[in-house]
Amino acid sequence: MRGILFSLVLICITTSAFRPHVFRLRSTKLAAVDSFDFSSRSGWDGFYDGQGSQPYEWHSSISHSIIAQHLVPGDANILVLGCGTSTLSADLYDEINTAKITSLDYSTNCIELMKQKYENTGRPGLSFICGDAVKLETLDHPELFTSIVDKGLVDAIMTGDAWDTAVTDIFKGASSVLSHKGSYILVSYKLSTSAKNFLNNLPEFTFTFNLPGSNDRVSISRAVKI
Ligand SMILES: C[S@@+](CC[C@H](N)C(=O)[O-])C[C@H]1O[C@@H](n2cnc3c(N)ncnc32)[C@H](O)[C@@H]1O
């Protein structure tokens, strides 16, 4: 009986038709993934608790090289929002030889794991900090960032109540920490027309959706600071 129940839960989790906001994961932690609110900090802390050095990649159908191609050659100071335990930050650092990549997540467990994993890997410009992406105006940063990369953060925020206020605040804060004409690269589930209309109405950015490399489930978008 328990076996049948588990199989049913697994089918529900992995079938996006049942849960439009459930993420598709390359992981063995599916049962745990279903048991928390993706928009809660304590939920994410629990998710990363004791995870170890094995990364979790969200939107694994999009290669990190493709994301790197959407960054501009002069990108010298990149902020990765909601970094999780993805290898994205290190891969971007290696691939584009960027001087500085700051990766932010609000889960202390996640940031501890990432600091331990990368502290002795010979990447002096790669740093991990704990912070809230909804409050970027309060971020202590010596210089403006040239680009922001978000893979799965806005998706997670959009599963919560009052997501519209949170997303508005993220982009308002992003504008305050980005340099002139800086870009926000958004890797997210394919956006509905209403979500695109919502983003197009944000006053700080101009969006281009479905950039090359997007697929039928995941979209790469660029928002340029006005
Ligand atoms: C779907 S995961 C994506 C992780 C990683 N970027 C990847 O591609 O594998 C979303 C991440 O955003 C973080 N997060 C959610 N809300 C946040 C917020 N308000 N501020 C900072 N991080 C947040 C979560 O802790 C989680 O690590």
Image (cartoon, helix red, strand yellow):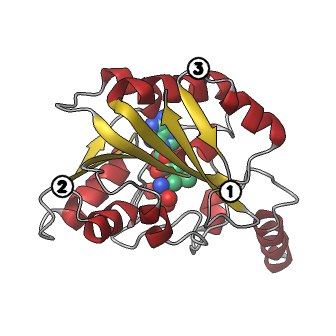
Residue nearest the viewer, comparing 131 with 212: 212
Q: Secondary structure at mark 3?
A: loop
Q: At 80% from the left edge and 44% from the top edge, which residue is drawn?
A: 192
Badge 3 vs badge 2, beta-carbon distance below 8 Å: no
Real-space Cα separation, disc 2 to disc 1, in angstroms: 38 Å
- Which mark's residue is nearer the viewer, 2 or 1? 2
Image: 4 above or below 142: below
Q: Which mark is residue 34?
A: 1
Count residues near mark 2 (Cα–Cα under 10 Å), then give few for <14, some for 14-19, many for 20+.
some
Q: Secondary structure at mark 2?
A: loop
Dot 3 or dot 2: first in sequence order is 2
Q: Amino acid at mark 3?
A: Pro
Q: Which mark is residue 92?
A: none
Query: Considering the image in quadrants, where does the N terminus appear?
Result: bottom right
Left or right? Give the position of 19 relative to 24: right
Left or right? Give the position of 67 relative to 62: left
Q: At 24% from the left edge and 50% from the top edge, which residue is drawn?
A: 76
